[in-house]
Structure formats: C-alpha cells, structure tokens
Image (spheres, grey):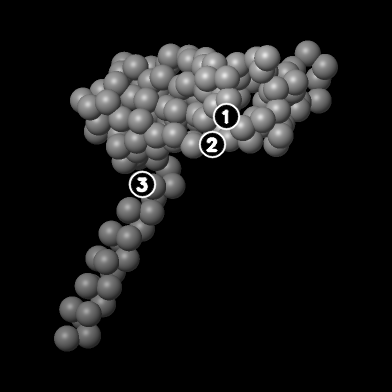
Amino acid sequence: MITQFIVTVAVLTMGVYSMVNDLVYGQELKTLDVVVNLNNVKDNIGTYEVVVTTYGDAILSKSRTIDTSSQTCPDDIESQCYSKAGIFSFPRESVPIDTKIQACVKEPLSGMEACVDGINSSKNSPETIWVNVPVKK
C-alpha cells in the first residue's frame, strides 16, 4: 500500500514538473502572444485604443485602451520614446504559421487610425509589432 502511494506521488510529481517545464520553456505554447509597442508618442500624449486582429481559422480581435503618458525613452539620442501597449494573447491553434496579424492604433477624438501588418512566424516566440500613433491635430 505504501509502495503504491509512493509510486502514485512520484508519477503525479513528474507530470506536474513536465507541465511546468513546458510552460516555462515554451515547449508547448498554447497561445500566440503579440507584443505591441507604440512609437511617435513623445509629442502625442493621450489615450489611444489599440486593436490586434488575427486572420487565421477565424478572425479574432482583442483591444485595450492605452495612455501614452507612460513612456520608455532609451538613453541614446537617436532612439524615440515609445509606450508599451502590452501583450495580446490568442489561441495558438486558431492562428496558423504565416497568418496575418494586424495591430491598429486609433485616436478616439479625431478617429484617426494607423495600422501595421505582421505575420505569425515559425520562430515559436512572441511576435512584436511597432505602430506609430496618429499625430494629434
């Protein structure tokens, strides 16, 4: 009875370790993560709506509102400040390799919008898309 209990615990522990290992090391990623960063924010501080759409087996969209007053400004003079819009996650099985991904940024008051297309590459890591925010008028 004790031997069976020890074997059961060992098997369960190995299963949990395997699941954690897969998650930590990305061996079985369940999601496609799209990282969106917003350029052209230094003189365009405000609230923007960011929408990420994937065009795979189904068209999937996620959105969030971003305040560009929070900016990252690299130390070198040549680089522009940017705002992180965050990570947008989609079910990996719904977004095959080479599927189009589009990130759009909309300024709600003027309705001006800027979009950039990307693809779900085969690199098995998050896709990053940089989008210039529309210039406020």
Rendered location of residue 18, percent (x, y): 33, 53
Tell me which amino acid carries mark 3.
Answer: Asp
- Residue 26, percent from left and from top: 39, 40
- Cβ–Cβ under 8 Å for marks 3 and 1: no
Is residue 107 visible to us here? yes
Q: Secondary structure at mark 1?
A: strand
Badge 3 is on which residue? 22
Mark 3, other Cα within 10 Å: few <14 / some 14–19 / many ≥20? few
Given this view, does label 3 or label 2 mark the residue nearer the observer?
A: 2
Mark 2: few/some/many CA within 10 Å (<14, 14-19, 20+): some
Q: Position of residue 51 (x, y in %)?
A: 45, 28
Question: Sequence order check: which comes first, mark 3 or mark 2?
Answer: 3
Asked if disc 2 and disc 1 are in contact, CB closer than 8 Å, the reply is yes
Q: Say which amino acid is labelled 2.
A: Thr
Q: Is residue 84 visible?
A: no
Bin the neighbour count of mark 1 within 10 Å (Cα to Cα): few under 14, some 14-19, many 20 and up: many
Which residue does the numbered mark 1 point to in the structure image?
Answer: 48
| Residue 9 percent location from the top left of the image | 27, 73
Residue nearer the viewer, 31 or 66? 66
**Separation of marks 3 and 2 at Cα, in angstroms:** 32 Å
Residue at image coords 33%, 24%? 54
Which amino acid lies under the numbered mark 1 shown in the image of this protein? Answer: Tyr
- Which of the labelled discs sits on residue 65, or is there none? 2
Mark found first going from the N terminus, 3 or 1:
3
Dot 2 falls on a residue whose secondary structure is strand
* Number of numbered callouts drawn: 3
Q: Is residue 34 shown left or right of residue 68?
A: left
Q: Secondary structure at mark 3?
A: helix
Res 55 quadrant in image: top left
Left or right? Give the position of 84 relative to 125.
right
